[in-house]
Image (tube, rainbow, N blue to C red):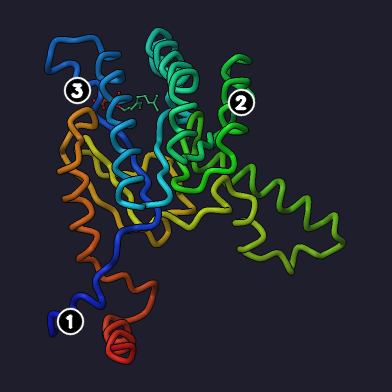
């Protein structure tokens, strides 16, 4: 392959990065610190990654901050994590707004504390018109929950319009998912050495490129992101087509 053609078929930066931020507990353990110290450092890395995405003009970033399964953690750790979200919403919302970032919380919010729900609504309203970067924070989120809530709403809408279920299409359901108005993630990064999805965006990741790294989330930095982006740039995304078809298309547009 000529280098020009290689450049043509290489991926540009992803439009949407999703991240499973794993390894905070181990990072703290290795330093003989309480787990929450890992989460605190993890929250700083979140700030750093938001800035990197803004600088790199990557317009969508979705972070898995708290899963529907994370309620099973010790109550003290759950409380401390919720306090970190409070801090983020109280202290950072204005800065995000000034930086052109739109903040959205995805997940079941009805069983979050009432004050947290208010902070979420305020931060979302404040940043709603921003378009430089959409930051989706998944809190009390699970992919199966997302598909279930979308199915209920999509089927109800469909039946209300008088249609039979025979005409129900994939797109009807997709339109009700949490990230319906964002492009699907191009790249999923999971830190911390595990290689699984853990009930993250299970529908939306159907064609996403996966990148797993042993780096613990609190150690994830600009260089680590660069490595992930380099790996992504070398993937050939076929979406069900053959490699030859992709090359033919690239030659035709050369
Ligand atoms: C996984 O590490 C991390 C979490 C469950 C929480 C993610 C939260 C943060 C990055 C900090 C807060 C973020 C915001 C947006 C305020 P783990 O605890 O499972 O680590 P381990 O696998 O090493 O135990």
Where does label 1 land, which residue?
4
Where does label 3 land, which residue?
26
- The extreme front residue here reads 98
Quadrant location of the C terminus in the rendered image: bottom left
Q: Distance between the residues labelled 3 and 2?
A: 34 Å
Q: Which residue is drawn at 16% across and 39% down?
A: 214
Across and down, in percent, residue 45 comes to 27, 30
Snapshot quadrant of residue 91: top left
Task: Name the N-terminal-most of marks 3 and 2.
Answer: 3
Q: Do the residues labelled 3 and 2 touch (CB within 8 Å)?
A: no
- The extreme bottom residue here reads 252
State whether label 3 is within 8 Å of ligand 1: yes
Q: Which residue is drawn at 64% across and 42% down?
A: 149
Task: Name the N-terminal-most of marks 1 and 2.
Answer: 1
Q: Judge by depth and name the residue closer to the eye, 166 or 94.
A: 94
Across and down, in percent, residue 1 comes to 13, 84
Q: How far apart are marks 3 and 1 (CA)?
A: 44 Å
At mark 3, the secondary structure is helix
Q: Is residue 121 left or right of residue 208?
A: right
Foreground: disc 3 or disc 1: 1
Residue 96, above or below 150:
above
Where does label 2 land, which residue?
122
Across and down, in percent, residue 170 comes to 61, 63
């Amino acid at each position: 392959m000529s280098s020009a053609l290689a450049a043509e078929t290489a991926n540009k930066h992803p439009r949407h990065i999703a991240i499973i931020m794993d390894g905070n507990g181990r990072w703290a353990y290795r330093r003989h610190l309480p787990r929450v110290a890992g989460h605190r450092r993890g929250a700083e890395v979140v700030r750093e990654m938001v800035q990197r995405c803004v600088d790199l003009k990557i317009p969508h970033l979705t972070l898995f901050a708290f899963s529907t399964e994370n309620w099973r953690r010790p109550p003290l750790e759950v409380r401390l994590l919720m306090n970190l979200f409070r801090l983020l919403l109280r202290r950072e919302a204005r800065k995000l707004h000034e930086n052109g970032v739109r903040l959205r919380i995805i997940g079941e919010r009805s069983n979050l504390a009432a004050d947290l729900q208010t902070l979420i609504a305020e931060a979302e309203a404040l940043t709603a018109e921003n378009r430089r970067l959409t930051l989706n924070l998944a809190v009390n989120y699970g992919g199966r929950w997302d598909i279930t809530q979308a199915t209920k709403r999509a089927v109800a809408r469909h039946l209300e319009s008088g249609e039979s279920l025979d005409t129900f299409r994939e797109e009807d359901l997709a339109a009700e998912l949490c990230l319906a108005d964002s492009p699907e993630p191009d790249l999923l990064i999971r830190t911390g050495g595990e290689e699984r999805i853990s009930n993250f965006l299970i529908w939306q990741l159907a064609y996403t490129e996966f990148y797993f790294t042993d780096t613990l989330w609190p150690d994830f930095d600009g260089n680590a992101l660069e490595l992930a982006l380099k790996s992504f740039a070398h993937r050939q995304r076929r979406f069900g087509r053959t490699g030859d078809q992709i090359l033919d298309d690239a030659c035709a547009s050369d």
